[in-house]
Image: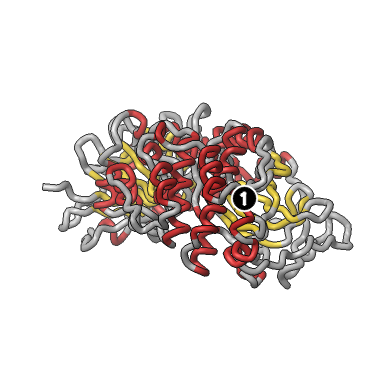
Amino acid sequence: MSSTTTVFQPLQADDPLAVAGYRLAARIGSGGMGRVYLSHTPGGRPVALKVVRPELADDPDFRRRFRREVRAARRVRGAYTAELVDADTEGAPPWLATLYVPGPSLTQAVARRGPLPAPALLHLAAGIAEALQAVHAAGLVHRDLKPSNVLLAADGPRVIDFGISVAADLTSHTATGSAVGTPHFMAPEQATAGQVTAATDVFALGQTLAFAALGEPLYGDGVAPVVLYRIVHESPDLSRLPDPLRPLLARCLEPDPERRPTPAQIVDWCRSRRGGEPATASGPALWREIAGPGTAVPGPAAVPHAPPTAAATRSLRSAPPRPARRPLTVPATAAALALALTLAGLTWYATDRFGQGAPATGAPAASGATHSPRAATGPTRSSHAAAQSPATGGPRTAAGSPRPSRPASRPTPLTAPSGTVELSPVWLDQSTSLSLRDPMLLPDRTGDIRLDCSDDADCALTSDSAVFVQLFNGKKATRDTCRHLLGGATGPAYRTWSLAAAGEGAHLCVRDAAGRVGALALQVKQTTFREAAFLQLGLTVWPETP
């Protein structure tokens, strides 16, 4: 952590030079909510400025949650939290700025030096618990406390991302009954989509401390479904933990939330083990060794001497300056929209007319699966020609605008010799649908899988009988993984799945009423213009278990 380049990266071509007057000095990283940049207040104090991803910024439900969480986060004041100093929930895109904490995350510190000694663990436990007191006092539940959300400053830990970054997850998961958080650090009630309370954060605190003491997750590594099963159904092995910490973690990791200690009780417990001495009694030198050498923080980005409309000079890279962008006028915006829709239509027409689609990008595949000739050449969408407009005789979008006509032909058989079906690319819009049985591509809305972008809801996959579960953290869909995840997906809550947090490359498992299991790999997503929304997918359907 002594090298600046290991923490800060130069701005890239797609990074802005400034956000709402904050000039950006470097890129710090990215996460589920968006990108994080280093900037500075007018007085020169460094801040971490988080810019929301465009697909979330376009989601009305996310905007509402983001406004609420920012209002609550402004009330959080604690010695062990990273204070929110500024935000714009109505910006394009929305953003927020917190005080920058110069220090590694707990994950990085453990990777560098190994498990922490017992005195440092007591200091860490008391600091995180005190941070949770401040978060809970503001009416927030962190929901995603984990080692990467604990930064180790020279004077103690800092808890970040309380209640804000998870607004993105809540947008797409709360309504469906899915779990929110990082699987390896979830509480049992999170893993089973139960009620989340302040006690949920205490369970995560116990897991975070165990990670710091062991150098690995308490419930082991592995795919999320396996780890979540252990959290819900198995008791952790606490024998490997240091003796001074074992009684505290045993209480924090109680399956029953009512039996867990409060953050205030944890602070008192740690104080009693230190004989009432302050947290620094664990030794300033020891804690500085845990946090590692200080990292040089780049200074404020240089203000260009040219007028505001001239190109800005980047301080961290030698790329040529970019010309300033001028606001689009209303006619220009309309023209851009018309051009985008025209190009989308031409691309769609070319795909259908010549039987050539974009190659699959991460289409799921089962081990040993055999591709059918249909999958090898890419399916055409000629069967959609049946969806004709009475006035023009051509197919129409959900908004009523005609699309170029396509030749009508009956699709070839879709079942591969192994029983596994793989199709890519598959197009889905608001006038068509998909099914996990033959025929899989339907020209109307009678299939099991439909795209819905109605005005009063997010763009979502919907079904009357099929259920959906999304894989996160870049996980790929396999038959065994999907069967496991879908085993507990029952009821209407799983029949509508918001696409707000499903970016390109995401995988979703799906099971229809007959028990057939498949997966959707999201290759292209266009939901900004709701009336012309569409998805390009890779579709895999696995054979039924005998």
Of residues 105 and 93, which is closer to you in this image? 105
Quadrant of the rendered structure where residue 529 is?
top right
Residue 253: horizontal and vertical position, in percent?
39, 43
Tag 1 residue: 277
Q: In screen coordinates, is 446 left or right of 90?
A: left
Q: Residue furthest front?
A: 275
Q: Residue at x 48, y 41 (%)?
A: 201
Q: Residue at x 33, y 57 (%)?
A: 222
Of residues 385 and 439, which is closer to you in this image? 439
Amino acid under label 1?
A: Glu
Q: Residue furthest left?
A: 546
* Quadrant placement of the N terminus: bottom right
Q: How many marks?
A: 1
As displayed, is residue 109 above or below residue 480?
below
Of residues 128 and 479, which is closer to you in this image? 128
Q: In screen coordinates, is 309 left or right of 39?
A: right
As displayed, is residue 215 above or below residue 99?
below
